[in-house]
Image (cartoon, rainbow, N blue to C red):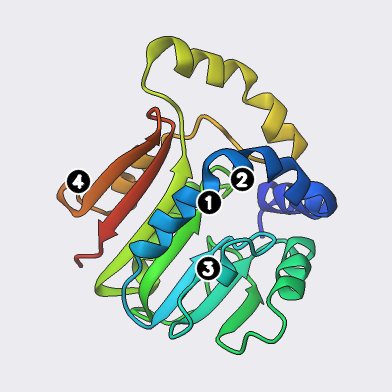
């Protein structure tokens, strides 16, 4: 594990006790509706969620789907385990998104939700997602990223140090560019703006 990964992992461990409180205002305003769109896009019976955090999404999955969730923060994962007690279809594992131990072509759908602001090497993490997703499988991502609007983008760059040094999240990642760098073709990618051009629902068909 790189020093940068350890640093961000430690920040998430530190903030795990109040993470749900910090996300509360956004959850109340919009995120439940966004999560519905995320769940509606899932295909198949075997799903991987990368970066489950405190497990907020896990109880919204259909009952007939096998869910494996991973996160590199053991303290965040403890919160997720508490939320999913008694749910036999959910398995939670401490694991780094940049170096997954799953075999190639394992999952029908891979899900991320506000994760790729925090993965230290986002392109490497996206390559791993492409590897473990089955051919013609689906990647569904609910992610925030740097605005393409000139002024808004510059503001995001200027204030990025605050969330970055508080818990390790970059608000100015160019995630769509990173997806292409990871080997996905532009024609495989569909996007829907959920909040300006900052929060997007991204659906990728994994053509290999």
Is residue 5 among what the camera can see?
A: yes
C-alpha separation, residue under disc 2 versus residue under disc 1: 6 Å
Give whichever of discs 3 and 2 has the lower sequence position: 2
Pointer 2 with pointer 1, Cβ within 8 A: yes
Q: Going by the image, does 73 lie left or right of 70?
A: right
Q: Quadrant of the N terminus?
A: bottom right
Position of residue 188 relative to residue 101, above or below, is above
Task: Name the residue that disc number 2 marks.
Answer: 27
Q: Secondary structure at mark 3?
A: helix
Q: Which residue is mark 4?
A: 186
Residue beneath the point at 42% across and 24% down: 147
Mark 3 or mark 1, which has the lower sequence index?
1
The span from disc 2 to disc 4 (Cα, nearest Å) is 30 Å
Cα separation between marks 3 and 4: 30 Å
Number of residue marks:
4
Residue that appears at 51% across and 79% down: 67
- Give the number of the mark in front: 2 or 4: 2
Label 2 or label 1, whichever comes before in sequence order: 2
**Which of 156 and 165 lies nearest the eye of the viewer?**
156
Q: Which mark is residue 32?
A: 1
Mark toward the viewer: 3 or 4: 3
Pick whichever, 99 or 145, lies toward us: 145
Question: Which of the 4 image quarters holds residue 97?
Answer: bottom right
Q: CA distance from mark 3 to mark 2?
A: 14 Å
Foreground disc of the pair 1, 4:
1
Q: Secondary structure at mark 4?
A: helix
Identify the residue shown where x is 30% and y is 54%.
203
Task: Give the residue number, with chain letter if any, for mark 3.
Answer: 60
Mark 1 residue crowding within 10 angstroms, few (<14) / some (14–19) / many (20+): some
């Amino acid at each position: 594990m790189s020093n940068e990964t350890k640093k961000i992992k430690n920040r998430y461990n530190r903030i795990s006790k109040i993470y749900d409180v910090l996300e509360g205002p956004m959850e109340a305003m919009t995120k439940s509706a966004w999560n519905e769109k995320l769940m509606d896009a899932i295909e198949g019976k075997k799903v991987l969620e990368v970066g489950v955090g405190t497990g907020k999404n896990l109880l919204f999955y259909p009952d007939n789907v096998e869910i494996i969730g991973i996160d590199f923060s053991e303290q965040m994962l403890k919160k997720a385990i508490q939320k999913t007690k008694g749910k036999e279809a959910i398995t939670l594992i401490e694991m780094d998104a940049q170096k997954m131990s799953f075999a190639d072509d394992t999952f029908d759908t891979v899900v991320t939700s506000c994760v790729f602001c925090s993965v230290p090497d986002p392109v490497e993490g996206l390559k791993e997602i492409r590897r473990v997703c089955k051919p013609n499988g689906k990647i569904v991502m609910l992610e925030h990223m740097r605005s393409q609007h000139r002024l808004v983008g510059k503001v995001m760059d200027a204030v990025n140090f605050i969330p970055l040094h508080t818990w390790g999240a970059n608000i100015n990642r160019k995630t769509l560019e990173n997806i292409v760098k990871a080997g996905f073709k532009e024609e495989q990618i569909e996007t829907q703006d959920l909040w300006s051009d900052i929060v997007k629902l991204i659906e990728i068909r994994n053509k290999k």
